[in-house]
Image: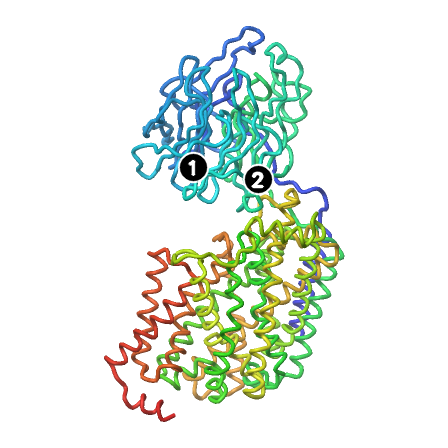
Amino acid sequence: MHILKRVWLLAVCLITIQAAAQDHTNETFFNWREEASLPDADGLAGGYAGVSNGALILAGGTNFPGDKRPWADGVKTWHDTIYVLDQAGGSWKAAGRLPRPMGYGVSLSWDNGLLCIGGGDAERNYSDVFLLRYAGGKIETIKYPSLPIPLVNACGAIAGNTLYIAGGVKTLNGPATQQCWSLDLNGGSAWKALPTLPGEARMLAMAGAHDGNFFVFGGVALHNGQRQYLRDAWEYKPASGWKRIADLPYALAAAPTPAYNAGQSHMLLFGGDDGAYASKVSDLKDAHPGFRQEILAYNTLTDAWSVMGKMPVQLQPDAADNPHASRYAPVTTPLVVWNGNIVLPGGEARPAVRSRKVLVAAPLQPQGKFGGLDWTVIGCYFLLVIGISVVVSRNMGDTTGDFFLGGQKIPWWAAGLSIFGSKLSALTFIAIPAKAYATDWVYILNNLMIIVVAPIVTMFYLPYFRKLKLTSVYEYLQIRFNAKVKVLGSLTFVLFQLSRLGVVIYLPALVLSTVTGTNIFVCILLTTFVTTAYSVMGGIEAVVWTEVMQVFVLLGGALVSYFYMAYHTDGGVSGMMQEAWQADKLRVANLGWSMSEPVLWVVVVGAFLTNIVTYTSDQVVVQRYLTTSSEKEARRSIYTNALMVIPATFIFFGVGTALWYFYRHHPADLNPHGRTDDVFPWFISQQLPAGLSGLVIAGLFAATMSTISSSMNSIATVVTTDFYKPFRKDATDKQSLRFAKYVTVLLGVIGCGIAMYLVYLQNASIWDQYLKIIGLFGGCLAGMFAAGIFFPRINGKGIFAGFILSSIGLYLIQAYTTVNFFLYPLFAVVGCVLTGYLFSFIFPDTAKADQINNA
């Protein structure tokens, strides 16, 4: 009791501190500063910039020396000096020279060097491609295949290992081009001509790369020497070619390029030229506010543009800069990512005015708008959850039967809701909406296949589990096969659950970190500590009753969020369904016969076997079958869970589609730095009314911690029943109970460590990661149970060998093939059964087979 009080006081202290520190000012996505100015006193534009061996490089470019602008008959000067900045806060130094004075080519960081593509000077344009690598204070130049034609003012980006180049101008004062090329940077010897860029031929366009695809934004078309600024945008997919995407909010050219990839779904453009300044050179000397100052963000998932802020206030204006300009937005300069920050070196500060400035932008993760009322609701909710566990723990006996099975007195409806609640974790609440938001409804069958699996479980598996009076489901493997097979099955389950435990700890910590700004590692530690404490105190009965309450809270929160998004967007539910249908966001099946894509047959087969894995060999689920008083009650609990899954699945996939619809129409409200899995928590913290957002987040955390405690209790049950008791045959029940509680504490420590590791993985979809874990660890385990129940001739030696060989085969399939992860359970189950059958013929056990057949 005193432990729970201390836990509660710790939680209250954290909540109070966070509530007091909550900042409700406008979100800022970048922290701007300036690095050491460029050495050239007149500034530089059109240079090549990138990173090599941790150093920032700027090479070549142009300026007007001595502040002689075009209106003063000044002549543009071309440079070849290579400047290097070894570290942040250091000083620029000259480290070498380019092959010739040149500028306005494409420059990209690649292979620990600066890749320079094309460019020109006052006399001609060039097709040269070379890499500048900086090491030991010297510059090394490495030649690459030359461009098919000379190019200046083109744009380019690297997608994967492929370099793309589009547009530009071939000859001095010549027309722009629509031509595009690609080069395989992993040893490609020649450029490949691509389909021409649709729309106008252009120069000074911006490029980007995302998820293996190449993007071109805006630019300038030339008509009889006159510039026409463009706003169309295009995406090139290697498998299907060019596709037009949403137009820029306004015509734009010459913004620092390539676009910055923020988060997992945004590309950002900083500033740029919209052509609004005077066209006559004589007018350029007059006071002018400069170029566009907005930061534009393109969301690749919703195909929508938004303004995510503005360039920084000018802190240290150059002498030649317009003193009336309050903000500084350079053009005709590359965008470089250096030490995780965005760098804009030099460029044009305003028309015909070069700059020495080196702007640096550090991405900032904004906090959620959580207020005092939200924190109060969270505090009250946690108090209620802990109160339930305290009440139940008072009535709980002091035996392992009470701790593991709740005395087999749980009602069927509560056991059914508990099965459902144990699966309705952060994995459901966060990852499924995120998957539907990012893609479509193809994965929906993964949940709905429980309708097919439930009758199989109740007809073939449940009678064995109940009549044998098991505590650990893996005791069945010893009865059916032998002790070695039981140990193998139990150990596999423990490894599988430890992997899952890390996922379900990581996700809620990600939520709290996203919505409050609290460090994610602090969130992981707090979540694990609180959960471990009440898991040790309450046992399975506290877990069950806590889950019953959370089922209704979470489903209610999801429904409220769905209708809030639909009715706070023009068009409502009908508009959302129509727009989602047109964008193919409601697709439930991909037709085809590929084994590497989630086509219909792959999803159906994989979903069926994934559910078989979960509902026949997962101690977390099977343990709830055993908490009821009879087989009839257990059967009812299974069907209760199946019936709950159907509406819940549609609710959570619907939430994902609603998120896509909402942020397609409110793109500026989305966090550009966020991961895909952040999208629903971000919406909860930013859009739901005060108090309601706190309730939804609190319910999510409570359900998640209940899921964590379910895993902890089940692992402790298996470890105690299948490992501790057989090796400590003289141990009393009280000693076994004490051991189980110690194991629970250790599991909290291990789960915390795995969750911290997942932070560094930064997987695009945590649900994909979870399904891969199921396929790797759970499939072969389910194969052993299927072999035991449906194939009497398979013996212990055979199934042991079958499990090992099918596990090795599955690992090789994952590592060296492109087979979709949905099929991992198929290869695991079938492989385990077939190889088990084969080895049972090689190593027969006639006595065991006769015993099984007679039974």
- Tag 2 residue: 298
- Name the amino acid, label 2: Tyr
Report the quarter where the C terminus lies.
Answer: bottom left
Report the quarter where the N terminus lies.
Answer: bottom right
Sequence-first disc among 1 and 2: 1
Q: Residue at x 66, y 45 (%)?
A: 666
Q: Nearer the viewer, residue 245 or 368?
A: 245
* Residue 674 location (% of width, % of height): 58, 48
Q: Residues within 10 Å of mark 2 (few under 14, many from 20)?
A: many
- Name the amino acid, label 1: Ile
Can residue 48 be seen? no
* Residue 280 location (% of width, % of height): 60, 12
Q: Secondary structure at mark 1?
A: strand
Left or right relative to 847: residue 652 = right
Label disc, if present, on residue 387 of the rendered structure = none
* Residue 187 location (% of width, % of height): 30, 37
Q: Tell me the CA gap for discs 1 and 2.
A: 18 Å
Left or right relative to 38: residue 189 = left
- Tag 1 residue: 158
The quarter of the picture where residue 539 lies is bottom right
